[in-house]
Image: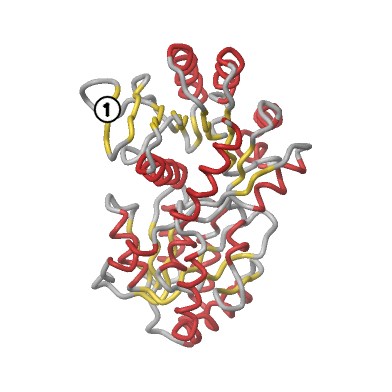
Amino acid sequence: MKIAFVYDVIYPYVKGGVEMRIHELAIRLGARGHDVHIIGMKYWDGPDSIKTDGITLHGICPPQQLYADGRRTLFEALFFSCHLLLFLMREEFDIIDCQQFPYIPCFPVKLASVMKKKPFIITWHEVWGDYWYEYLDWLGAFGKVTERLVTGLTPNIIAVSATTAKKLRLLGLCNEVRIIPNGVNPRQLRSLPPSTEPFDIIFVGRLIKEKHADVLIRSFAVILSGSPNRTLLILGDGPERDAIRSLVRNLAIEDRVFFKSFLDSHDEVISLMKSSHICVIPSTREGFGIAALEALACGLPIVTVDHPDNAIGELITEETGFLSSLSIEDLSSKIEVALCRYPSMKTNCMISAEAYDWDRIVDRVEQFYKSLTG
């Protein structure tokens, strides 16, 4: 099959969960003999199309500013979408897998699919629903309408979690939703050494209000009152970073809380996970939770928030972690239990992550593609 993945940003030039998923699937599909292409903005010098790891990267337009005031820019999505339509009308693919975000590129993919009489898939990583109003205020109504329109562009839908699939159905989607989650590479993770910097607790993620790093900080201050030698690593960046640092100073716990921005090497992130005891991500909005899955693969129990919009909860069992309410008292209590029990939970955490091995995930993706292309 000649397969195209469509997403405006491309790994490793931009690193995130969606980019990583496309990369991991693409190199495995390419190794199985498929002709795999990734279509995005051009982040490199030289020719517009380059071959790497057995896959072809197409830079169809110059990169544009992705964020302004902490939000994705509309111009970037429109600019990419215009170039995308021109590119797709010139090329032939057996199947196109278009990522739902940032929504607008899904429309030129639909048009090209109709014109070329070829199937396409939309992979949904998250459904925002009413969150659009928090993101764009009254303009969120347009975002919400656009999201609803995208659900009707194709009957071929992949959701990366049951939480996302459920929210798609709440939007009124009647077609079957194929749940194919994100994955990890357990063998690669096992080969990486732990960092020389040990921590009791690690938080990994963007510092945005939905991740509730402030609640973690306040809960950690409660834990320090009884266990003053505990340590916490906040690994990430985002618009809440200054507020979180200020909270740490106000609570006078700077000597026990450590900050690192997102690292250039993903291996460094994994090494820091492997030198920690537990992972705490008190998020109330996660489409999947790749950082939590990677932590499980490293043997770390997870503490997260029990919330209908938090897909990390799908990874949690009695053997792999703890669900908490979004309260300082409950979260600090669950963290303390996890810190006591983590040695006995390590093996079960690692075993649970085996089900998400990328080699297993690509089997399901390939089977779905073949069912659509005959």
Q: Say left or right for 30 vs 365.
A: left
User: Where is residue 143 drawn, in percent x and y?
Assistant: 65, 30
Residue depicted at x 61% and y 41%:
158
The residue positioned farthest toward the left in the image shown: 46
- Which residue in the structure is indicated by mark 1? 50
Instruction: Find numbered disc 1 in the image and state the secondary structure of the residue it sits on.
Output: strand
Q: Say left or right for 342 vs 54.
A: right
Q: Say left or right for 166 vs 197.
A: right
User: In the rendered image of this protein, does residue 328 appear above or below residue 184?
Assistant: below
The residue positioned farthest toward the front in the image shown: 374
User: In the rendered image of this protein, does residue 366 appear above or below residue 294?
Assistant: above
User: In the rendered image of this protein, does residue 89 appear above or below residue 148?
Assistant: above
Q: Quadrant of the C terminus?
A: top right
Camera-side residue of 226 and 130: 130
Residue depicted at x 53% and y 24%:
105
User: Where is residue 180 drawn, in percent x and y?
Assistant: 57, 49
Q: Residues within 10 Å of mark 1 (few under 14, many from 20)?
A: few
User: Where is residue 343 drawn, in percent x and y?
Assistant: 44, 85
Camera-side residue of 246 and 346: 346
What's the image's color scheme?
A: secondary structure
Q: Amino acid at mark 1?
A: Ile
The quarter of the displayed image where residue 38 is located: top left
Residue depicted at x 64% and y 34%:
156
User: Where is residue 3 drawn, in percent x and y?
Assistant: 45, 31
The quarter of the displayed image where residue 115 is located: top right
Q: Say left or right for 333 vs 59.
A: right
